[in-house]
Image: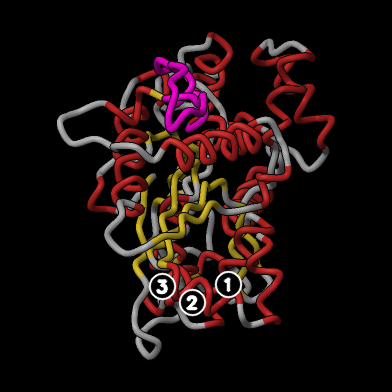
């Protein structure tokens, strides 16, 4: 098997050696914060922890001890598989008290953290898709939700036992290492799974041949692209829609794709969530200013950790942080039917 730097085999070996990592968004943010210096300080007569990562730089976070400690507890619990995994973190307070600054500061730190070689996020793309058939002149298709190559490795075969055996035999992962990897298992997104199945049919299931259609590539960290750390500010009630978060059917792709059942006809990157779905941070500014159906979309995403369109699912790995001012939050609290959202 080819050992080029952009093959799946090479990526898995790098993960095995420890020079690349596979972790979810909560584990990444938690590790970033806890690897920094932590001090015990006394604030208003009460002993609390001060995390130095939030105090770095010429323009850093001042105060907010309770809020930062609460956030760290939330992320740490989620990283360890606790109930916080199915919740979002919302900062509620008066306008101008630094909520947005705190989240944007965290996002900047996270991007810097991911720019280090050991922490860098990778994804995969399907190449030579024009040879597969049904894709017209589309020659290369990148995972729409920036899925980690390890997610592909855990879904190479339909049989889960075959996947585990492949990782052990081909790469040399121990049973303990495989068990650790599978703690972050999730199925392939709808379009990746569909395309991978097309490739399986074309090659009659010959794995070495199938892997020739895979190329590993780093996830772009450009702030202006909204990848890894993305922000969705609340828009007015008329112009906002779930398309802004989830994406929509792409007319351009339909010109190439002859199979109308192919989920790749949906352009997920048109929405804000898919761009941060590979272990990123999604920042929803003034979340309760959005219209109700958009907040309901957030509830589904927070709880199920997946983007759903027309019955198709794309599992995502995203830390969702939101802000709200007091008046909007209390107005939302007063509506009894919104209790499930408040709970999350």
Q: Nearer the viewer, residue 89 or 4?
A: 89
Residues at marks 3 and 2 touching, judged by CB atoms closer than 8 Å = yes
Classify residue 228 as left or right of residue 225.
right
Q: Quadrant of residue 16?
A: top right
Residue under the image location 53 percent in, 74 percent down? 330
**Element class at badge 1:** helix
Q: Which mark is residue 242?
A: 2
Q: Is residue 186 above or below residue 194?
A: above
Sequence-earlier tag: 1 or 3: 3
In the image, residue 318 lies at what x, y percent?
Answer: 53, 48
Q: Is residue 51 above or below residue 295?
A: above
Q: Which mark is residue 297?
A: 1
Residues at marks 1 and 2 touching, judged by CB atoms closer than 8 Å = yes
Q: Quadrant of residue 233?
A: bottom left
Q: What range of the chain is rendered magenta?
A: 29-50
Mark 1 neighbour density, 10 Å: few (under 14) some (14–19) many (20 or more): some
Residue under label 3: 244
């Amino acid at each position: 098997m080819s050992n080029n730097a952009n093959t799946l085999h090479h990526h898995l070996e790098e993960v095995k050696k420890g020079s690349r990592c596979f972790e979810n968004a909560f584990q990444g943010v938690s590790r970033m914060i806890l690897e920094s210096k932590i001090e015990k300080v006394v604030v208003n007569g009460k002993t609390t922890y001060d995390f130095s990562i939030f105090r770095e730089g010429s323009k850093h976070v001042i105060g907010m001890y309770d809020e930062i400690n609460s956030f760290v507890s939330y992320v740490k619990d989620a990283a360890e598989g606790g109930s916080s995994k199915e919740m979002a973190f919302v900062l509620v307070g008066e306008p101008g008290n630094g909520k947005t600054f705190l989240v944007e500061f965290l996002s900047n730190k996270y991007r810097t953290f991911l720019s280090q070689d050991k922490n860098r996020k990778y994804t995969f793309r399907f190449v030579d898709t024009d040879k597969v058939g049904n894709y017209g002149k589309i020659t290369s298709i990148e995972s729409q939700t920036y899925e980690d190559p390890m997610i592909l490795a855990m879904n190479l075969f339909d049989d889960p036992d075959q996947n585990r055996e492949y990782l052990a035999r081909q790469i040399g992962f121990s049973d303990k290492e495989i068990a650790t990897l599978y703690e972050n298992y999730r199925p392939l997104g709808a379009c990746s799974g569909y395309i991978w199945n097309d490739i399986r049919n074309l090659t009659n299931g010959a794995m070495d041949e199938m892997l020739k259609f895979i190329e590993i590539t780093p996830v772009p960290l450009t702030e202006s692209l909204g990848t890894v750390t993305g922000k969705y500010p609340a828009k007015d009630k008329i112009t906002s829609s779930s398309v802004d978060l989830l994406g929509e059917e792409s007319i351009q792709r339909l010109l190439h794709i002859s199979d109308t059942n192919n989920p790749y006809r949906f352009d997920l990157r048109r929405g804000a969530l898919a761009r941060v779905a590979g272990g990123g941070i999604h920042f929803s500014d003034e979340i309760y200013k959005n219209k109700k159906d958009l907040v309901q979309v957030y509830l589904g995403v927070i709880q199920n950790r997946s983007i759903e369109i027309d019955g198709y699912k794309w599992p995502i790995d995203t830390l969702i942080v939101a802000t709200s001012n007091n008046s909007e939050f209390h107005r939302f609290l007063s509506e009894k039917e919104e209790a499930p959202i408040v709970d999350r």
